[in-house]
Image (cartoon, helix red, strand yellow):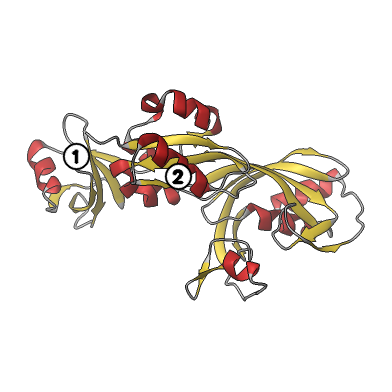
Amino acid sequence: MMQSGLINVLKPPGMTSHDVVAYIRRLYGLKRVGHAGTLDPAAAGVLPVFVGNATRLVEYLADADKSYRAELTFGFETDTGDDTGQIIQSRPYNRPQLSQIEAALASFIGVSEQIPPMYSAVKIAGKKLYELARAGQVVERKARTIVIEKLVLVTEAESGLVFDVKCSKGTYIRTLCADIARRLDCLAVMSFLVRTRVGSFCLEQSLTLEEITANKEQALQAADTALTHIPAVILSEQEAQAVKNGRSICCRQSGADLVRMYDRQQNFLGIGRETGQSEERTMLIPVKILSPDR
């Protein structure tokens, strides 16, 4: 039987997310490997990697919120937004007061609009922004709605500050660093980034590539561990057989849109969507069924 599941990888700095996927492909001898939530090459931290049949679930973890620890350094800006890029402007700054920093951070909490940086994987007219940027082009980007749930100061110094942030998908921390600095009437770049959480996957439980190589079977987690943010429903034997065959069923409503579906033996069947036909009953439509790997 083909190996299937996901791995909570601790991506090292210096590797792209694609590099990590390529490493896992070689290690497990599989083509079907994917990841949720790209990390910048210079950044480190949690990178969930899906293996085998579990790759069909990548999209559901991509929507999960994320947490980071970041450092920004005052005094200049670069074309990439971090300290690996070319300096495009610099100016002296007065070190902000602690009260000013805390007020600036607090002002970003909630729903806001953010313009993606040129050095990002966002596509415009079929081209990734970083491809256009490398060709010397700068194009207009539409602002995206993001949500920042938590933004707290960890430490501050003469040259910059370190903060923790919990945010929605699609939030660019490099852009956030620059925006925080502008709120403080300064320039800044992101000089350090580690992702500490993706959904329920935390840095403390993540594994280095060396640890995965040494215990590759133990590194694989069950596919549904990526979906703890989605409510679960238990189906009868008849209902389970119906959804496995791709048929919709009428069942008790859970009140959620998407649900994880299990049979009576707690075997994970896949993802379903409720249509909410009445206050108590609903049509449950199979969206993604995970048949056993072969």
Task: Quadrant for residue 171, please give it.
Answer: bottom right
Identify residue for label 1: 294
Task: Quadrant for residue 117, please give it.
Answer: bottom right
The answer to whether residue 20 is seen in the rendering is: yes
- Mark 1 and mark 2 lie on one chain; the one further toward the N terminus is 2
Q: Is residue 175 positioned above or below 126 on the image?
A: above
Quadrant location, the C terminus: top left
Q: Residue furthest left?
A: 238
**Which mark is drawn over residue 282?**
none
Amino acid found under the numbered disc labelled 2: Ala
Which one is closest to the eye, mark 1 or mark 2? 2
Q: Position of residue 48 (x, y in %)?
A: 45, 41
Crowd class of label 1 (few under 14; some 14 to 19; many from 20; radius 10 Å): few
Q: Residue visible at 49% across and 49% down?
A: 18
Q: Residue visible at 12% across and 37% down?
A: 236
Left or right of 28: which side holds 128? right
Left or right of 198: which side holds 220? left
Q: Nearer the viewer, residue 272 or 213?
A: 213
Identify residue for label 2: 22
Crowd class of label 2 (few under 14; some 14 to 19; many from 20; radius 10 Å): some
Q: Position of residue 188 (x, y in %)?
A: 79, 55
Q: Position of residue 265 (x, y in %)?
A: 17, 29
Q: Position of residue 142 (x, y in %)?
A: 57, 72
Q: Is residue 163 positioned above or below 207 on the image?
A: below
